[in-house]
Amino acid sequence: MKRTGGRSSGIRDRDSRSGSSSRDTETATERGALEVGKLFVAIGVLSALVLAGALVGPQVLATAENITGTGDDAQIPAAGDRNPELTDPDDPGETTYQTDEAVVSSDAVEDHIHDIVNEKRAEHGLEPLEWDGTVASVSRTHSWDMYETGEFSHINTDGESPHERFHAVADYCQVYGENIAETSVGQPVERASDGETVEHQTAEELAGGIVDQWMNSPDHRAAILEEDVDGWDRGGVGIYISDEGRVFATHNFCTLR
């Protein structure tokens, strides 16, 4: 049996959120509207097929928030630091999965995604994102939380948005974006770019499949290529791999204050 693992078909996820909100009001506005202090856009894309009578498939969501506030420059970790002082206390750390060919490490997948995303950006004349270890720690925690709770969403079960989750750990990002995805490793999946069935056996293959999924979805591609923001400074990738080979990916983008 096959799980889909890369197609973005344009079917909207019923659990996805779309609209604008602010911390001080719950008034719903038309998606994409800018409110004072905060812009939140969440767009869900679900590629699905019937497997053993169930609707399953990779899910991808993209969001961006523009938050006003004060940041503490002293808190900003050095770019490229894999082990920053500031981390999410619930960070699950490294996870692994044994395929027929290799032990796939979440750390390696994160590094490959970061590199591939920067390659895609370079192809479009954009500067590379600097790795942010604090952002990555928050990303990793959200990936783990989505697996644990079964809630594939930018809003966690505590009602926290991406920036609110980050703000609980640090406060140096003025604009904060997020792409998320779910797929599998070591199992047949459907590639987003051409619909071919593939089986990701290595960290690099898995990373390539996840980025391929994002780049073939307009909203996730827009986040990576800065189509709706003035520019990202840093990025952090968080991967959680379950014992059964399910993979949850969160990629957060940060514009420094």
Image (cartoon, rainbow, N blue to C red):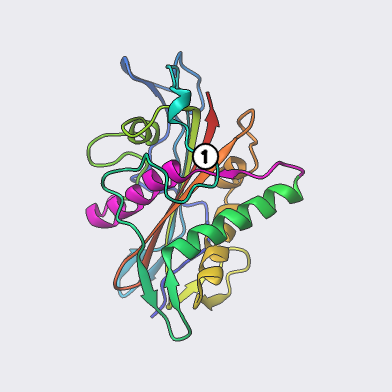
Residue 84: percent from left, percent from top = 42, 44
Residue 39 visible in the picture? no
Look at 46% across and 13% down and name the residue there: 36
Residue 225: percent from left, percent from top = 65, 42
Residue 237: percent from left, percent from top = 47, 51
Q: Which quadrant of the figure contains the N terminus? A: bottom left
Q: Nearer the viewer, residue 49 or 139?
A: 139
Give the magenta part as a residue range.
125-151
Does residue 126 show up magenta in the picture? Answer: yes
Look at 63% across and 37% down and name the residue there: 226
Q: Nearer the viewer, residue 236 or 123?
A: 236
Q: State the residue position of label 1.
A: 78
Would residue 208 appear left or right of 121 to someone viewing this image? left
Residue 186 visible in the picture? yes
Would residue 204 appear left or right of 125 to someone viewing this image? left
Say which amino acid is labelled 1: Ala
